[in-house]
Amino acid sequence: MCLILLLAVNIFLPLSAFAHVERGQAAGFLSGLQHPWSGLDHVLAMIAVGLWGAQLGNPAMWLLPVTFPMVMSIGAMMGLLGMPLPGIEIGIALSAILLGIMVLGEVRPKLIIAALLVGFFAIFHGHAHGSELPAGQSGLLYSMGFVIATGCLHGIGITIGLIHRWPTGRLALRIAGVFIAVMGVTFLWRALA
Amino acid sequence: MLAAIIAVLCCPSYAVAHLVTTGMGPVYDGIGHLLMTPEDLVAVLALALYAGLRGAVTGRRTMFLLPLAWLAGGIAGSMMGSLPALPVPALSFLVLGTLVAADLNMPDDAISVLAIVIGLVHGFFNGSTLKEGAGVLGLLGIMVMLFILIALASALIVSLKKPWTRIVVRVAGSWVFASGLLMIGWFIRGVR
């Protein structure tokens, strides 16, 4: 599915060919698609969700990518309605730190705990997306774009996480967890500075 | 056979390039309207995904019920005045997205009712939009496209056998739900 979407984005890349964009529909979808990729904090946290899901195995491996967009949309709705959420950047940074630690330690909490943890951070990520719609673009297509892009990032994380079936792969994932957590600390530093 | 083909090719007739003369323009307008309206297209695809998850029989029923209900709703909409903007597609997204994401097992009759309701409601709004333009022919174009989309999409889902492929479909359902929730947010923001 992600391959088809990437192909679709490729086809849509020649923006000059968009003769009629009316209320900016085409640009809205592409803006939404690009938004999760525009911040390393988003990218790392989303991939970490996929990595951790792959480590936890079924049913977490699919439950997390299914529930995350749904909970994220609650945060996004808060963002676009202008409802304040204090410490968004701190929350996003903490998501990278905690999820990195989960991957590093191959922590296996109860499924409900894992879902709650991921859901909690999903609200922060969603709020950031929802409050950053560029002016003059289609809200629906922007929303669809960033939801799909977020899902694809999870898919990338899960696909990479499948290497945990091998001992070397498990080690590589734990190293990735260290990297994500360390980057989370730098994001937190920047957020607090 | 070859001689017949050559004979046909050698007998030129009017190349009806302009749909105005054929009267088929509004039908394609209807087809284009559905394909270019994500509020309708995504709802239709989500319903097709759900019907496919429930099996071939449900997919076949939906393939016929949805277009017919859409036509009925469209005709009703074209006869009535314009309605105020309502977040109807958002509600469709929420319901259908939840059903697909959770892979809920509803009775076949309930799914049939759902398809009819979705068709009537979306068709109604299509009808009131198209009455000044493509009209009933546009609705017929939409019907044809609905039939094709439901047939292809639900058949694809029915053909998926591996467990992880069903999970991919459920993930798509969660995306539809998320989009629906955000549409509600956009609607509230627009109203305020």
Image (tube, rainbow, N blue to C red):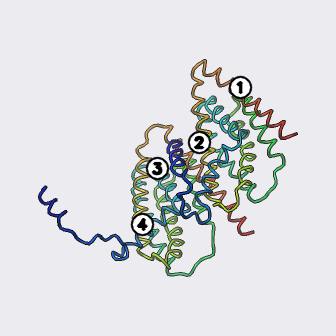
For marks 3 and 2, give the CA distance: 25 Å
In percent of width and height, residue A27 lies at: 61, 56
Q: Which residue is mark 2?
A: A152
Question: Residue at coordinates 65% horizontally, 59% vertically from top-left?
Answer: A139
Q: CA distance from mark 3 to mark 1?
A: 39 Å
Numbered mark located on residue B54 in the image: 3
Q: CA distance from mark 1 to mark 4?
A: 53 Å
Q: Which residue appears at 34% of the width and 70% of the height?
A: B17
Q: How would you rate the neighbour count of disc 2 (Cα within 10 Å): few for under 14, some for 14-19, many for 20 or more?
A: many
Q: Residues within 10 Å of mark 1 (few under 14, many from 20)?
A: many
Q: SS for tag 1?
A: helix
Residue type of the residue flagged with mark 1: Leu
Which residue position is annotated with label 1?
A: A104
Residue bearing the label numbered 4:
B143
Report whether A121 appears left or right of B106.
right
Q: Secondary structure at mark 3?
A: helix
| Horizontal side of residue A62 vs B75, given as left or right | right
Q: Quadrant of the C terminus of chain B?
A: bottom right
